[in-house]
């Protein structure tokens, strides 16, 4: 299967995805004299990043940091309040760019809940062929494509074609969901906790499958997970989010081996270790994240940061290249003097 959208509009140097100042606040009411006026939840608060063609950008952060909302904003399952999303140089939802519908033929998403994502009354062949048919592909071509892709994701069509979702295991259902996404021949696949519900051995199989498919189809991934090991395994770059903002972004090896932001350091230290000499008795990160309705002033991490200084509660740190020039971090104490226009690239 060659992807229908494999044409490289802007050349390899042009990022496949560019996100600029993306913002989404939920709820909240305004009123000068209204005593019931409430502040909104600042779910995603002005984030900018890019993903290079063929790259995998992993996104990590505690539950509620905004990573899933960010993904839904990118694919327009949620309408952003502000910000631009540009796919291979074409702005989404603008008259000079591409429509949301055109974007969705190039960007697909796989969710965590493999069962809820499938129609229980459709055999998996029909589930996989459904998207292409809705996209205008003839039934015979869509059925052929379904057979081919099910084979590619490791489900023997002779056995699985007419089975229903309830007859499959969790890992098999997630393979069907990946097949459904691939049937639309996307360029960018957004995977939101897509392997989190699977047993460890099945998870490893699906991760290997994703790596193979990426090479085979020239895909680009936005991979969201709470599991730092999984993100390290599959990603080229990693973006760390805290309370709706990016605190560190860079090559995955650089960030994991030498994290610069205190939150990234705490997150990595909180991973369980099998090494008895390397165990810590102190909690690397204390307390719960603050309320996103009223995030702390200045650096949002200052209420939990072990090295916070007076400036931290007063001035918000910008994402800035660190002294090693290899990644960006939003911390007064680790950033170099040079601010990099707050745009972060995985290239
Ligand atoms: Fe900690 Fe201050 Fe850096 Fe924020 S800016 S992470 S509070 S040192």
Image: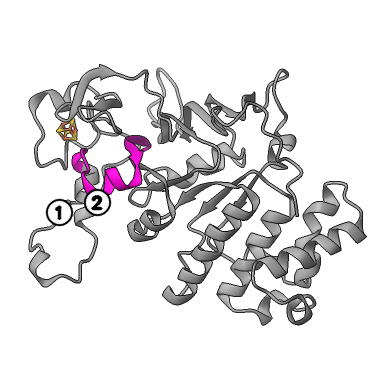
Q: Quadrant of the C terminus?
A: top left
Task: Assign a secondary structure to mark 2.
Answer: helix
Q: Are marks 1 and 2 in contact (CB under 8 Å)?
A: yes
> Which one is in front, 314 or 10?
10
Image point (53%, 27%), residue name: 81
Left or right: 149, with 14 as reference point: right
Q: Quadrant of the N terminus?
A: bottom right
Seen in the picture, residue 88 relative to 228 is either above or below; the reply is above
Image point (70%, 59%), residue name: 180
Left or right: 60, with 307 as reference point: right
Task: Assign a secondary structure to mark 1.
Answer: loop
Note whether residue 117 is visible. no
Residue numbers of the magenta segment: 240-262
Query: Mark 1 vs mark 2: which is more N-terminal?
Result: 2
Note whether residue 31 is visible. yes
Residue bearing mark 2:
267
Residue 66 found in image quarter:
top left
Image point (27%, 49%), residue name: 256
Left or right: 274, with 59 as reference point: left
- Disc assigned to residue 284: 1
Label 1, residues with CA under 10 Å away: few <14, some 14-19, many ≥20: some
- Mark 2 Cβ inside 8 Å of ligand 1: no
Q: Is residue 249 magenta?
A: yes
> Which one is in front, 343 or 284?
343
Please state the horizontal and vertical placement of residue 213, each as a whole percent of the image: 60, 57
Residue 17 found in image quarter:
top right
Q: CA distance from mark 1 to mark 2?
A: 8 Å
Image point (10%, 42%), residue name: 306
- Disc assigned to residue 243: none
Seen in the picture, residue 132 relative to 250 is either above or below; the reply is below
Ligand 1 location (quadrant): top left
Seen in the picture, residue 61 relative to 152 is either above or below; the reply is above
């Amino acid at each position: 299967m060659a992807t229908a959208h494999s044409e490289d509009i802007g050349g390899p140097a042009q990022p496949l995805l560019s996100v600029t100042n993306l913002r989404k606040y939920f709820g909240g009411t305004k009123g000068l004299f209204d005593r019931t006026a409430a502040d909104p939840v600042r779910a995603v608060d002005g984030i900018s990043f890019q993903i290079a063609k063929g790259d995998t950008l992993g996104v990590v952060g505690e539950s509620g940091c905004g990573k899933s909302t960010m993904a839904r904003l990118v694919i327009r399952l949620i309408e952003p309040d502000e910000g631009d999303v540009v796919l291979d140089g074409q702005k989404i939802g603008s008259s000079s760019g591409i429509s949301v519908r055109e974007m969705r033929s190039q960007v697909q998403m796989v969710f965590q809940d493999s069962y809820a994502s499938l129609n229980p009354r459709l055999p998996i062949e029909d589930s996989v062929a459904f998207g292409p048919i809705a996209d205008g592909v003839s039934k015979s071509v869509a059925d052929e494509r379904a057979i081919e892709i099910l084979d590619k994701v490791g489900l023997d069509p002779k056995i699985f074609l007419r089975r229903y979702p309830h007859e499959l295991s969790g890992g098999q259902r997630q393979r069907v969901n990946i097949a459904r996404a691939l049937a639309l021949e996307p360029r960018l696949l957004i995977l939101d906790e897509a392997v989190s519900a699977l047993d460890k051995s099945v998870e490893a199989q699906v991760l290997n499958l994703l790596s193979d498919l990426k090479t085979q189809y020239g895909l680009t991934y936005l991979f969201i997970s709470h599991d730092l090991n999984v993100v390290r395994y599959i990603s080229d770059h990693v973006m760390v989010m805290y309370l709706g903002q990016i605190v560190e972004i860079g090559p995955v090896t650089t960030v994991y081996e030498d994290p610069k932001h205190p939150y990234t350091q705490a997150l990595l230290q909180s991973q369980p270790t099998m090494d008895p000499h390397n165990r810590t008795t102190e909690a690397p990160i204390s307390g719960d994240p603050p309320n996103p309705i009223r995030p702390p002033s200045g650096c949002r991490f200052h209420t939990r940061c072990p090295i916070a200084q007076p400036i931290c509660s007063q001035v918000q740190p910008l994402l800035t290249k660190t002294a090693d020039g290899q990644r960006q971090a939003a911390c007064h104490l680790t950033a170099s003097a040079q601010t990099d226009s707050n745009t972060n690239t995985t290239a």
